[in-house]
Amino acid sequence: MKSSRAIAIAKFDEARRLRLGVIAFFTTLALLLAPVAAYARAAPASFADLAEELSPAVVNISTAQKVERPSFGPRQGPELPEGTPFEDFFKDFFDKRGGGNSEPRTVQSLGSGFVIDPAGYIVTNNHVIEGADEITINFANGDALDAKLIGTDPKTDIALLKLTEEPSEPLPFVPFADSDKTRVGDWVIAIGNPFGLGGSVSAGIISARSRDINSGPYDDFLQTDAAINRGNSGGPLFNMDGEVVGVNTAIFSPTGGSVGVGFSVPANIASNIVDQLREYGETRRGWLGVRIREVTDELAEGLELETASGALVEDVTAGGPAEDAGVEIGDVILSFDGKEITEMRELPRAVASTPIDETVRMIVSRKGKTQTLKVTVGRLKEAGEDDKKPKAAKVDDENADAEETFVALGMKLEALNREARERLELDKDLKGALVTDVESTGPAAKKGIQVGDVIVEVAQEAVETPESAKEKIDAAQKDGRSSVLLLVNRGGDVRFVAVRFPKEE
């Protein structure tokens, strides 16, 4: 039988173990709930203070545009006998419909914008003010002031306005953020003028980055589920520090209202455009002078790349920055000015944002080996200013008339002769194998190769005759490759095509 002392010690040990168990339980529970608590602390309890602080810098923009009424002509009404009771009625009706001397009508529209400088500079969308004859800025305090257009960039849908008169006192304004630091899941709020209601605030998160919605060559939108509707265009998307991370531009909506998918031009793109418009009144984008395409898995094999990434050069503009830097057709641009190019569409944005005449390093892959080139960026000419590619010269004396035909990948290849050069208007110096027939179900046809195309390279090696083209295609197949890379000239334009070898049965 245990003594009273032993019983007391046993009870003490049991109580001690129980206390340790309780401590361990709550410690574990605290560790498990820590991420939830951290998230709860990160979520704002209210956006009220931020909305109150930022709203005065957000403006409503109303525009007026005079549009000529359509003229129905003096004799668009029915032919009536002179003196009929309805003669005057129909004459008055068609005169009011615009027959003859009607006055132009005024079309009005509404949008949003925000002040970026206390001197009266305002950012909005190009489509908000496009074609406007009058622009009025409506402030949250009730003031309505006229504005003029400083400059616009349709390619990014950004426009810069300025009040026509200096404000009597500095205006409230908001700064741009570094949008590259914005992460998916970050809280944002949108303030604007949806449906003309004015001063409306909505909240959400960044849903995705780098969205391409096929609206232009420099698409790199932030996607948000903060409610954006018609009239929000040109308004700001704010982060929780009260900085503009994007300019609200577009929505995806089958109904015309918000379905939680809105798009904003990132602040880093918008601020760069605004700086150029403010300094020059126009954009001045960088230019490289290459025509590029996406690197697919099939092309990657032929280009001797480990992964399908970068921008494949299909053409180099004569006398352009790329040619001066030593860029060649078939190069794959992997890096530009320290920025990795993983997708083709990243290169135009990187080049466009580079200052004119700045020399940068560019890493390219050429036949499986990387090289570093130095390129001095030129200035991109706007539409209508681009030099037109001269039409290929017709050959005056060509006496090569080969009749031998070679078949490869479901296409017939023949030598270029005088008749073919003249018919296809090919340059007299062009060398290669002419495609004279394509089997409709063959490998070449599946990749879009057509009669009249000229194969100028096979596996990144130049070919001058159909025989050499056939030999190099056969050699690639014997090497165990699943496809072969062809450089095809079609009417003076060249492109790379990866054609798969048919599977042996």
Image: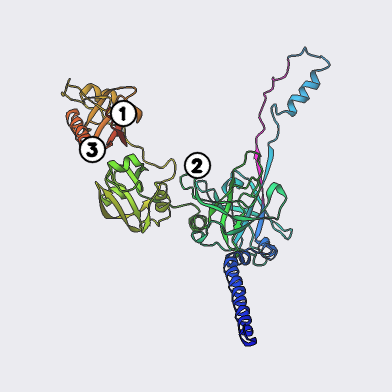
- Separation (CA) of disc 1 from disc 3: 18 Å
Choose between 373 and 76: the one closer to the eye: 373
Q: Is residue 441 above or below residue 360?
A: above
Q: Nearer the viewer, mark 1 or mark 3?
A: 3
Q: Are marks 1 and 3 in contact (CB under 8 Å)?
A: no
Residue type of the residue flagged with mark 3: Gly
Q: Is residue 442 above or below residue 311?
A: above
| x, y percent for residue 261 | 60, 47
| x, y percent for residue 190 | 63, 55
Residue 21 is drawn in which quadrant?
bottom right
Q: Which residue is mark 3?
A: 480
Residue type of the residue flagged with mark 1: Ala
Choose between 407 and 454: the one closer to the eye: 407
Provide the secondary structure element on which disc 2 rests: loop
- Residue 259, numbered circle: none
Choose between 206 and 345: the one closer to the eye: 206
Q: Which residue is mark 2?
A: 214
Q: Which residue is mark 1?
A: 444
Residue type of the residue flagged with mark 2: Asn
Bounds of the magenta segment: 61-78
Residue shown at 73%/50% (left/top)?
A: 197
